[in-house]
Amino acid sequence: MRVGARILEVCEILEKLGPVGSGDIGKLMALAKTGEKPNAYRYCQRAVGMRLITVIKSPIGNSSHYNVYTVQPDWRERIKGGNLVVKQERSNLSPIAKRGVFSFASSIFQVGA
């Protein structure tokens, strides 16, 4: 899987700053310096999906949440030549689960109501 330049930039910022929120990351991204508003939250979520960074959802007050992101210590080793090295963690799953194919009712008529 290809890792984009913005995701690499997010990881480098987190490596320098330590645990911070996406708002602080967005202020330091190169796009912010040109006057464009970067969507740092989206890049952080993509990096979380690639397991390059972790997120801790901490509540502030009663209704709002603030996500704190931390870079994984081995993130540079997991990226070789701009590509993500994916570890085989799904070897114990059944063949159907590996493919991700699941059957479900797509209409009310298939449910048998």
Image (tube, rainbow, N blue to C red):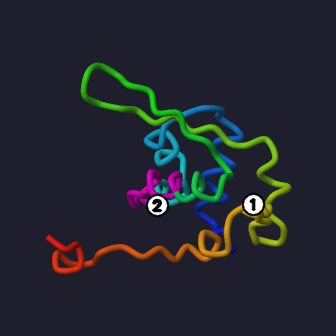
SS state under label 2: loop
Which kind of residue does numbered mark 1 sit on? Asn
Residue 22's spot in the image, x, y percent?
Answer: 47, 43
Q: Residue 8, located in which quarter of the rendered image?
A: bottom right
Q: Residue at x 55, y 57 (%)?
A: 30
Q: Are marks 1 and 2 in contact (CB under 8 Å)?
A: no
Q: Is residue 40 magenta?
A: yes
Point out the frontmost of discs 1 and 2: 1
Q: Residue at x 36, y 73 (%)?
A: 104
Q: Which residues are magenta?
A: 35-45
Q: Nearer the viewer, residue 112 or 28?
A: 112
- Which residue is under mark 1? 92
Q: Is 56 left, or right, of 37 in this rendering?
A: right
SS state under label 1: loop
Q: Is 79 left, or right, of 65 in this rendering?
A: right
Residue 17's spot in the image, x, y percent?
Answer: 65, 34
- Which residue is under mark 2? 34
Q: Nearer the viewer, residue 26 or 111?
A: 111
Q: Nearer the viewer, residue 19 or 51?
A: 51
Which image quadrant: the N terminus? bottom right
Q: Residue at x 53, y 33 (%)?
A: 56
Indicate which disc residue 81 carries: none
* Residue closest to the far top: 61
Residue 107, compared with residue 89, is above or below; it is: below
Quote the CA–CA distance across marks 1 and 2. Answer: 47 Å
Query: Crowding at label 1, few (<14), some or many (≥20) Cα neighbours within 10 Å?
Result: few
Q: Is residue 43 magenta?
A: yes
Query: Crowding at label 2, few (<14), some or many (≥20) Cα neighbours within 10 Å?
Result: few
